Amino acid sequence: MTREVFDAIVIGAGQAGPSLAARLGKAGMRVALVERHLLGGTCVNSGCYPTKTLVASARAMHLARRGAEFGFDAGPVRVDMRRVKARMDGIVGAARAGLENWVRGMDGVEWITGHARFTGPRTVGVADRELAAGKVFINVGARAARPPMEGIEQVPALDNVTVLQLQEVPRHLLIAGGSYIGLEFAQIMRRFGAQVSVVERSPRLLPREDADVAAQVQAILEAEGVQFHLAAECMAFSPGTSGVRMRTRCAPGDEWLEGSHVLLAVGRTPNTGDLGLDAAGVRTDARGFIEVDDQCATSAEGVWAVGECNGRGAFTHTAWNDYEIVAANLLDGERRSLRDRVPCYALFIDPPLGRAGMSEQEARATGRPVLVGKRSMQRVGRAKEASETQGVMKVLVDAGTRHILGASILGLAGDEVAHLLLDAMAAGTTATALARTMHIHPTVSELVPTVLQELQPLGDG
């Protein structure tokens, strides 16, 4: 096996990997970027790009069916799943091709296709090559979890990757898991015309969200015909006459659903099991996520882990921020930390949920006095004009300092409006200052100051 020495090795080409390789190459380093499958990772190939493309197609169909509300008749709307998929594949393919062209033109970076496995400290084997470097960066992401549920090996279960390959709309899609991936696909497939049933082990959806917000998410999807089966602690599967059977309850008597397809959306598993991390001295936690400090450094000297595989964030934007932190600390002489960022994410149903900072439960756990401001989207003029009045704005504020602790914006443009609160939190802007800021009318964001002018003590939960 030929041994080759690089300045840096980047394992995995998801959101963080290529950008990090480019920065290192520009700094004059010789860099190996190793990817065993497709450049772009989950986001480009099986996450953000394809799923949000499907969300857009489903929304267009949904609005067309609502034509009468807006004063026109669009006629019957019939989905052509092959054309929907072709549109999705085209957008994903163009994004991946652009990324490949960028990587090929990077100064000082060699793109190597193959599976990388540590053979020793900062030494990696790829096919018949052995690569060594003073710095190694792991960006291998995660995949859909497949827990050992009863009967799961007896049925052809879809995951977030294989569901994207469907050429026809499922007759009845059963979804195991009522979290973000499951709920987004529930609405997409329902709008495409499928019967959809979501089965969730917990007593309610989205356990980490505020109960009132989660209840409104459920109501939005139920209004479109999605059915929910909660507290399904005895989830199980078996072949059915028309596809698959799924148990939703075992007491007082067995209750089973019959569907044509089943989608597993019950969590994520890091792609770390076949990397030879023990040989490199890289520690993982009980779930396989790589343990890192607040600068993304692992337990092994000269090895960092960025993106979903480090367990410090499961989103494209957290992976990108990991890259920014590592690059700033190593190349720019800065001292940035994971502790500096405000948690944020979105649930991309329609209308979307934008989240920033603490939940109500987390705010209560701090023990400080907390104020809350809430306003229904039914009281937002822009939402009324668009006939999009589902949802709520909710903001949590420290009663003493008036600093914003968290926000949930469920409704029209909620994923965009949440950034107003996120930026204020990052900048240390108080709720008082934001409440006195003049906003543009008519917008959804203009109601944020109004919400902050109506703060009340957070009652007992």
Image: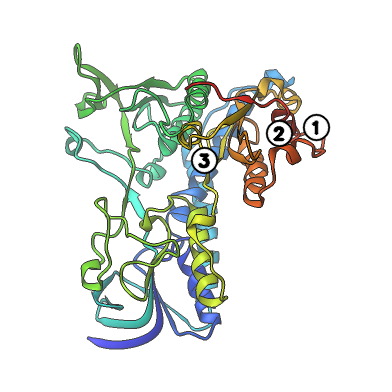
Disc 2 marks a residue whose amino acid type is Val
Res. 131 image quadrant: bottom left
- Residue at label 3? 54
- Residue at label 2? 448
Please tell me whether mark 1 sits on a helix, a strand or a loop. loop
Above or below: residue 358 compared with residue 136: above
Question: 10 Å neighbourhood of mark 2: few (<14), some, or many (≥20)?
Answer: many
Checking the image for residue 141, the label placed there is none
Please tell me whether mark 2 sits on a helix, a strand or a loop. helix
Return the x and y of residue 203 as percentages of the image width and height.
35, 23
Whichever of labels 2 and 3 marks the residue nearer the N terminus, that label is: 3
Q: Nearer the viewer, mark 1 or mark 2?
A: 2
Question: 10 Å neighbourhood of mark 1: few (<14), some, or many (≥20)?
Answer: few
Spatial CA span between label 1 and label 2: 12 Å
Q: Nearer the viewer, mark 2 or mark 3?
A: 2
Res. 173 image quadrant: top left
Disc 1 marks a residue whose amino acid type is Pro
Instruction: Work out whether residue 100 can be spotted.
Output: no
Q: Nearer the viewer, residue 69 or 83?
A: 69
Residue at 35% in and 87% down: 5
Q: Nearer the viewer, residue 385 or 460?
A: 460
Spatial CA span between label 3 and label 1: 29 Å
Return the x and y of residue 62 as percentages of the image width and height.
58, 28
Above or below: residue 188 compared with residue 302: above
Residue at 37% in and 53% down: 311
Please tell me whether mark 3 sits on a helix, a strand or a loop. helix
Return the x and y of residue 432 as percentages of the image width and height.
73, 37
- Residue at label 1? 442
Left or right: 27 in relation to 449: left
